[in-house]
Amino acid sequence: MKTAFVTGASSGFGKACAIKLLENNYKVVILARRKEKLVELEKTYKDNVCVIACDVRDYKAIKKAVDNLPDDFKTIDVLINSAGLALGLGEFHNLSIEDMETMVDTNIKGLLYVTHEILPRMLENGGHIFNFGSVAANNPYFGGNVYAGTKAFVGQFSHALRNDVRKNNIKITDIAPGLCKTEFSEVRFKGDKIAADKVYENTKYLSADDIADTIMSIINLKDHVNINRIELMPVTQTWAGFYIQKDKE
Ligand code: NDP
Ligand code: 8X3
C-alpha cells in the first residue's frame, strides 16, 4: 500500500485529493489547522488515515510531526502541497502587512517547510510531489499582486527542484487551476459569503473533484513521464487581455 501526505486536507483540493487517494487504496497523512474537519475523514477511513493538526507556517511543528509519523506512514510516495490562501483583492498599497505576510508565510514558506521535511523520505524509492500553483501565476489580474507572486514562486520552485532530484526518480508537478469553487473565495473575502458567492454566480466552475481526478490521472501515468506543469480552467473561463489607462495623454 502506498502512502500520501496531503496538506490543506480539511477543505477544497486537499480534502478531495485525500479522499480520491484513500478510495484508490492509499494510506494518507492529512494535515491542516482545523482538527475537527480532519477527524471527520479519519472516522470514515480509520486506520488508513493519520491526522496532523498543524500550521504549515510553524517549521518546528512540521518537523516534529514528520519526525514522529507512525511507522506505517513513514515512507511517503506522494506529497500534495495544497495548503494555501489568498487574502483580499485590492491594490497592493492597501493590503495589510499582516495579510501580505500570511500569504507569503503560508504559500511559500509553509510549502517549503513541508517539502523540506518530506522530500528525504522519497530519496530512496522515488515519489511524486504536487504543488498547487495557480493561473494567477502567469495571468496578472487586478488585486492579484502578492497572491499571484506567491503562486509564481510555487511554479518556479517546482521546476527548479526537479533538477535536484532527477537522479532520485522524483516527479514534480506544478498544478495551476483556474476558477474552482471551494472555501477559497470565502477565505479571500474574510467570511463575506455574498462576495464569495458572486465569484461563482451564474457560471460553470471547476469542482475540487475535477482537480483530484486530474491529479489521480497524472499519478497513474507511466513511471518515466513527468508532467511539469498543468494549467486547467473551466470552459467558461478565458483571458481578459490588456487594460490601457485612457486619461493620461
Ligand atoms: P480552501 O480554502 O478550500 O482550502 C485551503 C486549505 O489550506 C484548507 O484545508 C486550510 O485548512 C489549509 N490551510 C490554509 N492555511 C493553512 C496553514 N497555515 N496551515 C495549514 N493548513 C492551512 O482552498 P482550495 O482548496 O481552493 O485551495 C487549495 C490550494 O489551491 C491553495 O494553495 C490555493 O491557493 C490553490 N488554488 C485555488 C484555486 C481555487 O480557485 N479554489 C485555484 C488555483 C489555486 P485549515 O484552515 O483547516 O488550516
Ligand atoms: C485561484 C484562482 O484566479 O482567483 O488561484 O487567482 S484566481
Image: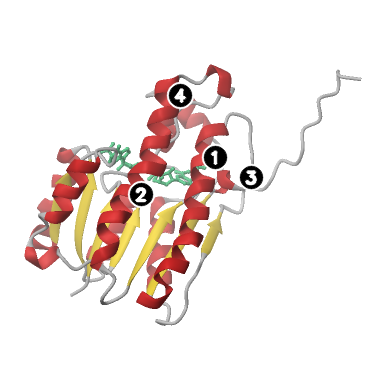
What residue occupies the far right of the structure in this picture?
249
Please rate how many residues cluster around mark 2, counting C-alpha atoms within 10 Å: few if below 14, some from 14 to 19, many from 20.
Answer: some
Asked which secondary structure carries label 4, the reply is: helix
**Count of labels shown?**
4
Kind of residue sitting beneath label 1: Ala
Q: Residue 3: x and y, percent?
A: 21, 67
Q: Nearer the viewer, residue 246 or 69?
A: 69
Inter-mark Cα distance, 3 to 2: 23 Å
Asked which secondary structure carries label 1, the reply is: helix
Whether residue 192 appears in this view of the structure is no
Q: Which mark is residue 194?
A: 4
Could you tell which of marks 3 and 2 lies nearer the N-terminus?
A: 2
Could you tell which of marks 3 and 4 lies nearer the N-terminus?
A: 3
What residue occupies the far front of the structure in this picture?
164
Q: Which residue is mark 3?
A: 139
Kind of residue sitting beneath label 2: Leu
Q: Residue 246: x and y, percent?
A: 86, 23
Q: Is residue 21 above or below residue 38?
A: below
Ligand 1 falls in quadrant: top left
194 displayed left or right of 28: right
Whether residue 65 appears in this view of the structure is yes
Q: Which residue is mark 2?
A: 112
Q: Is residue 210 above or below residue 54?
A: below
Could you tell which of marks 1 and 4 lies nearer the N-terminus?
A: 1
Q: Which mark is residue 148?
A: 1
